[in-house]
Structure formats: C-alpha cells, structure tokens
Image (cartoon, coloured by chain):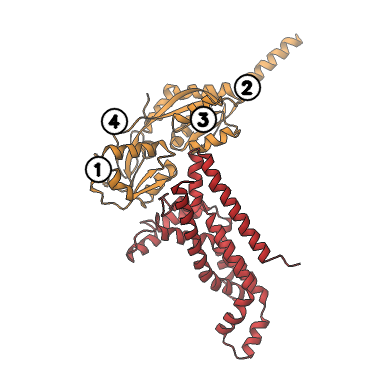
Chain colours: A red, B orange
Amino acid sequence: MNQEDIGAIRLTLELATIVTLLLLLAGTPIAWWLAKSGSRFRNAVGALVALPLVLPPTVLGFYLLLLMGPNGPVGHFTEAMGWGLLPFTFPGLVLASTLYSLPFVVQPIQNSFEAIGRRPMEVAATLGASPFDSFLKIALPLAKPGLVTAAILGFAHTVGEFGVVLMIGGNIPDRTRVISVQIYNHVEALEYAQAHWLAGGMMAFSFIALLILYTFNPAKK
Amino acid sequence: MKRLFLTLFSLSAIGAHAADIKVAVAANFTAPMKQIASDFEKETGNHVALSFGGTGQFYAQIRNGAPYDLLLAADEKTPEKLEREGLAGGRFTYAVGKLVLWSSKAGYVDGEGKVLKEGSFGHIAIANPGLAPYGAAAMQTLKGLGLLDSLSPKMVQGENISQTFQFVASGNAELGFVALSQVWKDGKLVSGSAWVVPAKLYSPIRQDAAVLSSSKEKTAAAALANYLKGEKARAVIKSYGYDFQ
C-alpha cells in the first residue's frame, strides 16, 4: 500500500464519521416525523428519503453536480453565502454522502419508533412528562437497536460509496479521493495487486460491520 | 440436380448472413463512431452494436472473456498489449486525437492559451493522466509551458475524458483539457471558447484498433476495420477534429 492509498483510507474514515454523526442528528427527527405524523405529505417525504435506495448513484451525482455548480440553485446559494462552490471539496462530499446514505439511517430508526407504539408515550404523558421529555427519556432508549443499526449501516454505506463521489469529487488526493475511487484508479491502471489490497480490505470491513450488526441486533425469533 | 439446388441454397444463405458485430469504443470516439456504424450498417446489412467506455475497463473485460469483436481504443498501448497476449491482432491507427483547452463560456479561453498564465480561475479539469491519454497529454503540455507546479493546486481530475468534459460543461471547472472531438463538429467549435493545443506540445495521441482473437465474426469485424480506413469514414472522423498519421 502506498502513501496515496493510506491517504484515501484516512479520508474515507473521516468522511464516514462526519456523515454518520450528521445523519443521526438529521435522520432521527425525520424518522420520528415519518413514524408519528398523520400529514398527507408523509408518503411523499418517505418516498423522497428512500430515493437513493433505487436511484443509480451516478444520477444523484450528476444532478448534484448541476445543482451545486455555478448555474444551479445550490451553487447560487453557497456563492452568495461566501462559501464558494461545493463540487471538488470535502464539504461537498459530506453533503452528497449525507443525502446518499439518508434512507439507510432513517428507515431503521423509523421502524424502531413505529414498533414502540402509542402506549409508552401516552403513559408518560399522563404522568406529566412533556412530549420532548418523553421523546428523550422513553422513545430514544427504546429505539436504541434501530439507532445502532442506522449508525452501522450509514457508516458502512458511506465507506462503500462510489458513483456520487466519482461525479462530484474530481479525484483530488487528501480532499476527495476516497477508497472506492482509488480502487477504481488501480483497476483502470491495471495495478491489480494494489487494487486487491484495498478491495479485499473493503470486503473484510463490510463483512465485519454486518457481522457486528447481526450479533448486536439478532433477528427476533 | 438436388445437389446443385442444395449448394445454391447454402450459398445464398451465406450471402444473406448478416453478422452481428460487437464493438468496444473509446468514449472520446462516441459521436463519430455512431455515424460510421450507421453508414456501415446501411452499406453492408450487418448489424453493429457499440459499447462505449474507458479503455482500461475494456481491457479488463476482454481479458475476462467479454464477447467483443473489435476494439477501438483511446491509446496505442492497450491494443499492443492485447496483441502481445495473443488476444487481438491486426492493429492499426484509426485516428490521432487532438487536445484542446476548452471553456463553456464564450470568450473565456483566448486563441493562444494565455488564460493559463493569468490563472484567475478556481479549477482546471484534466482527465486522470494515469488512465487517459488525453490526461497525460494535458500534463505534458502544462509541464512544457512551465505551469504544472503553479496550476496543480487548482487541478481536478475526471476519471475519463467524458467526465472531464462534464466538469467543464457544467461550469464547475471554468476550463479544462478535453478531446477536440468533444467540442468540435463539422470543422468548427460547437460552443464556448477554446485553444487548440499545438501538436508540438504533446506526444501524438494515437488511437489504435484491433480485431479480437476470440471474435466469432472475424470477417465482418475486419470489414468494419477496413471501412474505418476508407475515405467516407475518414471524412466523418476528420469532421470531428481528429487527424491521421
């Protein structure tokens, strides 16, 4: 493994950590709303969140490239804020990966919230707990398996992301060149030995992540 | 009599046999090849199926038994390598690519490439020089101009020349080195502004083709290869800004 490979590994872990934290923060309220809301927009929002599950990552990456570019609305906004344009930057990757991994975090949490049912929250309310209190002290602890699943899936999925980064990253060492892009570079350059190191490592990592998931969270018998 | 009949019948069957030729085409040659393939189909009645992609990817696929008949590579290395490994033969240069510095904005790139020295842009896109011949040619050009070190921090890389074009076309990179064939049609620039890099600044980008040894349609594939060398195909290739040896 060379210096570039190690740089790519470090960058990927950094990206996945930040994205997972952001996803837990943003995904939990979305999951709660989806689980509890009676709004007529609920299905539409649910479908929107699930889009990255079925869209080819290149489609998402292509639209992000256009939206975040100098002629896109997101690009106009970030330039007006003085942040510059997001493609080819680490924050751009963070934003793209957050969108891309959103369903992998929202759905397990949503399932956990739905499984809790109304009763525990109603009991808490009759005992005088505020809705926010009962959310923190009852709903969140009861949804812990879902939160753990969400964190592991969100992290692993971000590590494995390729198409979106390929479209908006620009292959810049230590800024946007993640492991999956580096594997692609090795394969394309016919450096199969180096590709095996990274690709094999990725297989092992993904397997271990899922193994932990299933050990921690065994299917209900 | 019966025998003669049978012979005639089988001969006519051979004559009517329309081959199905599968061609792996380098991404930068997409537009001209579509036109050439459709002309060839009309003239011969054969069917041509085109796959577009990166040459490195095609190499990996061919080594693993992909059923292509003809490879139109973006370089000369890959067909040569395949020939050495006994996987292809009959190499020839079907086009010589030209490098262009291009911006999607009109008037942004001047006719002499001075914009490179001014350096008032945020990003300059090139194709990955380790993978794409046009990327290697871009690096060679910048090195020759003595601008490589000053421009490196602004450089973004597309994995292939199509993606590099996309970075520039979407305006995310103000300018970039792409293949002339991507921005050139009927002898003129399609949009934006460009500097056609003088050929003396980089080694010629020879794009070679080869018929694959595993092909089941070798005759038809060779006919298409020959057609590529013909006047009609060459006129198409030239109109997209390619040269010949």
Q: Give the CA separation, mark 4 to mark 1.
A: 19 Å
Q: Give the CA separation, mark 4 to mark 3.
A: 28 Å
Camera-nearest label, 4 or 1: 4
> Which secondary structure lies at badge 2?
helix
Which of the pair B188/B60 is nearer the observer? B60
Which of the pair B65/A152 is nearer the observer? A152
For residue A206, which quarter of the picture? bottom right
Which residue is labeled 1 in the image?
B110
> Which secondary structure lies at badge 3?
strand
Crowding at mark 1 (Cα within 10 Å: few <14, some 14-19, many 20+): some
Q: Which mark is residue B71?
A: 3
Which of the pair B67/A3 is nearer the observer? A3
- Earlier in the chain: of badge 2 and badge 4, it is 2
Give the residue at x 58% y 48%. A200
Which residue is labeled 2 in the image?
B16
Crowding at mark 2 (Cα within 10 Å: few <14, some 14-19, many 20+): few
Q: Chain of mark 3?
A: B
Q: Give the CA separation, mark 2 to mark 1.
A: 54 Å
Question: Residue B116 placed where, x, y %?
Answer: 26, 45
Q: Are marks 2 and 4 on the same chain?
A: yes
Dots 2, 1 in contact, CB < 8 A: no
